[in-house]
Image: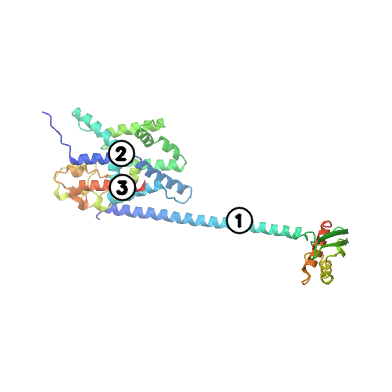
Amino acid sequence: MKKKKKISVQTIIEVMIRAVFFIIYPALFSTAFTGIKLIVEQITQRASLQWNSFVQTLVVLLAFTIVFGRFFCGFACAFGTWGDFVYFISSMVCKKRKKKPLKCFSKEGKILRYLKYVVLLVVLLLCIKGYSSAVAVHSPFSAFSRFHQLKMADSLIGTGLFLLVTAGMALEPRFFCRFLCPMGAVFSLMPVLPFSVIKRNRENCIPNCKACNLVCPANLEIPSDKEGDNATSGECFSCGKCIGKCPKQNTHNGFWGKLWLPMLVVKAVILFVIFRILY
Amino acid sequence: MKYKNFLIRLCDLILVLGLLAGYQAVIYSRDKEATIAELKSQVNQLQGEKEDILEAAKNSGKLGTDGASAGQAGTYKDGTYTGSSQGFGGEIKVKVTVSGKKISAIDIIEASGEDEAYLSMAKDIVKTILDKQTTEVDTISGATYSSTGIKNAVGQALEGAAK
């Protein structure tokens, strides 16, 4: 007898939000990162800092992250959505073979998460040295944006890197986002306002449960209400899986508590409208 | 401390924004100073050019108008020249003698159309022309047309004498 799996309303809404941003605004990550590159180049050339559409997108995303947390990473980044999709296929395949979804790098994750800061520094260093256009042409994201437009990629290196990243995304949830994304490195350093940080009421927890930690794609320890946030809070991209999983509804998002799903939609609408107005 | 990480990150962000603002201010004032220096050198250059032009203008002498163009306060070729111009009633003809590179004599050889009274008044302009060695002189009031006629006639004569 086959068990029929109910797809929850939450899952449908989450998929729809990711799909909308994937189709309509696939270049936000790249635009914001170009803003960072431009600022760094202007400083190294002792030129005055200029405002342009790239820097504007960067500032909008950073401000949004400060207020609402890394919602962008979790739902609005096309690359992240691609990773989620690839990982979903990979877990389906594992399920057919009666195996658990792959989490090949979960132990190394504690150290690997620092790699994205190294990637950020290396890319910025290359731009300072004048290789900015080479970086842009050969990056896996350029290849991705070409494929997104159903065209061939310009660079073989870019295509190769993109395939490697995709393979990684199949082996470990959010492989690129947690370990390699330079934009994610910047977002993780932002001071997320307290009411957007996901935390839990430790007193209420079932002893030795760890359900939230196990379901978290980034393998994070959810901070307690007492501490407010912890050292890995910057890694959280507000996917909300922990909130859905907790058997005692302990995890919550500040005073929004059980309004997680409506707040998710509100965040999506606000970000979408902002970009609609700007562009 | 609750939300320790938030507070640390907030301080870091404020620090970074402060550094960027400071950088921008320094670059801005540096750019302003560079513009000022450039404008100053432009002003100096233009002033130099202006002085050059004025020098050149002085050296080449003044340019006259209405037929007296040759009557400049300058040097003339020795010789006798005739010139004519319209007076009050008709043509006035003059004979101008240049000797020693100066206008030495002006003779009115014909002024039949002029009234005797006006003509004798207008003849005073001859003295002034000889004094100032130029036809850029005031006309005699009361005998404007006649003196203008003499003046222009001398000027025409001197066109041949101008060096």
Three-letter amino acid code of the residue under disc 3: Val
- Look at mark 1 in the image and give the residue it sits on: B42
Along the line of sight, which residue is nearer the eye, B57 or A55? B57
Q: Are marks 1 and 2 on the same chain?
A: no
Colour scheme of the rendered structure:
rainbow
Q: Are marks 3 and 2 on the same chain?
A: yes
Q: Are marks 3 and 1 in contact (CB under 8 Å)?
A: no
Res A37 → quadrant:
top left
Q: Are marks 3 and 2 in contact (CB under 8 Å)?
A: no
The location of residue B126, given as percent across then percent down, is 83, 67
- Look at mark 2 in the image and give the residue it sits on: A22
The location of residue A201, given as percent across then percent down, is 17, 50
Q: Chain of mark 1?
A: B
Q: Is residue B74 visible?
A: no
Residue occupying image coordinates x 83% and y 56%: B160
Q: Residues within 10 Å of mark 1 (few under 14, many from 20)?
A: few
Three-letter amino acid code of the residue under disc 1: Gln
Q: CA distance from mark 1 to mark 2?
A: 55 Å
Q: Chain of mark 3?
A: A
Classify A48 as above or below A91. Answer: below
Q: Residues within 10 Å of mark 2 (few under 14, many from 20)?
A: many
Task: Tell whether A17 sits left or right of A36.
Answer: left
Q: Given this view, does label 3 or label 1 mark the residue nearer the observer?
A: 3
Provide the secondary structure element on which disc 2 rests.
helix
Q: Chain of mark 2?
A: A
Q: Earlier in the sequence, mark 3 or mark 2?
A: 2
Along the line of sight, which residue is nearer the eye, A110 or A96? A96
Q: Are marks 3 and 1 on the same chain?
A: no
Q: CA distance from mark 3 to mark 2?
A: 15 Å
Q: Which mark is residue A273?
A: 3
